[in-house]
Image (cartoon, rainbow, N blue to C red):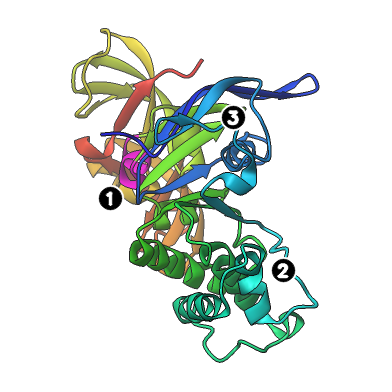
Amino acid sequence: MEHLIQLTNICKSFDDNQVLKDINLYIDKNEFVTLLGPSGCGKSTILRIIAGFEFPDSGDVLFEGRSMLAIPPYERTVNTVFQKYALFPHLNVEDNIAFGLKLKKMSSGEISKRVSKMLELVNLKGFEKRSINALSGGQQQRVAIARALVNEPSVLLLDEPLAALDLKLRQSMQLELKNMQKELGITFIYVTHDQEEALTMSDTVVVMKDGTIQQIGKPTDIYNEPKNAYVADFIGKSNIVSGIMKQDCLVNIEGVDFECVDKGFAPDENVDVVVRPEDIYLVEPDKGKITGTVESAIFKGVHYEMCVVAADGQKWLVHDTTLFDTGSRVGILVKPFDIHVMKKSV
């Protein structure tokens, strides 16, 4: 199958700072892809290269097999929604959305038809004549999305468009964006540093660090099967501890052997072990594989977040709906399929 977009061996530097290092990535039609990573990891630079606002030092950008390097931004079938929405304050909602269509000298009838369709899509029907300054942050964001989509691009690029919104509105807009993408059937490429956004909306997540891709996969695979300690730590809360892979399906943690499901490691190989807080069971001390003391307990709404300190000083983060009081002795149990063994991080 031919990919919609391919980035091959992309490198990019600003002055002496190399922000992208040999990036290889493909994106398919109708896919919701999220570039996820901390500030400065290169994710927005990838977006700008796809849009044509930046050019790579080496490598190529292919769109349906055709190189885009000589194609200016306005001739690419992509549109961008920025973190700062860049709306025109002197134009009302309707005129903001119609701006690009008027530049293309479309007929007034076609413009009216497209703008009406977009207003319905972003739930702003009846806001046509409203001033931009009279809109809330969430409404302004909807206008920015409608303005980008009204040109019927093949790809919509979104550079942290929800960052300025409060938590409740941000969560609501995550679902709206995913629904829009499904309804329109176009490709969304989304940039964020927020793990929840990436896991909630994406078909594919691309985890980045220091200009390199660490892992590409479905949200469930990224969360449950991280490739290394960086990905495990960045995607949700994790317990990452050192271990020794005694043999296939048997790992030693803190001097205790745990059954697991991982294979293919050398005998007695040093490894990193990931256990998610929600996968730890607290039991009576004599029933646990490891024993410890509850150091702290915080109510998080749907569960308690507890820190258990083992005898050797290792701290275990635990999420449980049952509260174990601070200072109480507990045992720790983990099921084999909830233990994820990885190659030792360099």
Q: Between marks 1 and 2, how big is the CA–CA gap? A: 56 Å
Q: Earlier in the sequence, mark 1 or mark 2?
A: 2
Image quarter where the N terminus lies is top left
Q: How far across and down, in percent of the image, does residue 306 sit?
A: 46, 53
Q: How far across and down, in percent of the image, does residue 72 sit?
A: 64, 40
Frontmost residue, 74 versus 276 = 74
What label sits on residue 283 in the rendered view? 1
Frontmost residue, 223 versus 302 = 223
Q: Residue at x 63, y 64 (%)?
A: 100
What label sits on residue 10 in the rendered view? none
SS at mark 1?
A: strand
According to the picture, the residue beneath numbered tag 2 turns out to be 87
When the figure is inspected, residue 186 is found, relative to residue 52, above or below; the finding is: below
Q: Residue furthest top?
A: 267
Q: Residue at x 63, y 44 (%)?
A: 73
Q: Viewer-nearest of labels 1 and 3? A: 3
Q: How far across and down, in percent of the image, does residue 288 sit?
A: 27, 41
Frontmost residue, 2 versus 286 = 2
According to the picture, the residue beneath numbered tag 3 turns out to be 69
* Amino acid type, mark 1: Val
Q: Residue at x 44, y 52 (%)?
A: 154
* Amino acid type, mark 2: Leu
The magenta-colored residue range is: 218-225
Q: Earlier in the sequence, mark 2 or mark 3?
A: 3
* Amino acid type, mark 3: Leu
Q: Between marks 2 and 3, how big is the CA–CA gap? A: 28 Å
SS at mark 3?
A: loop
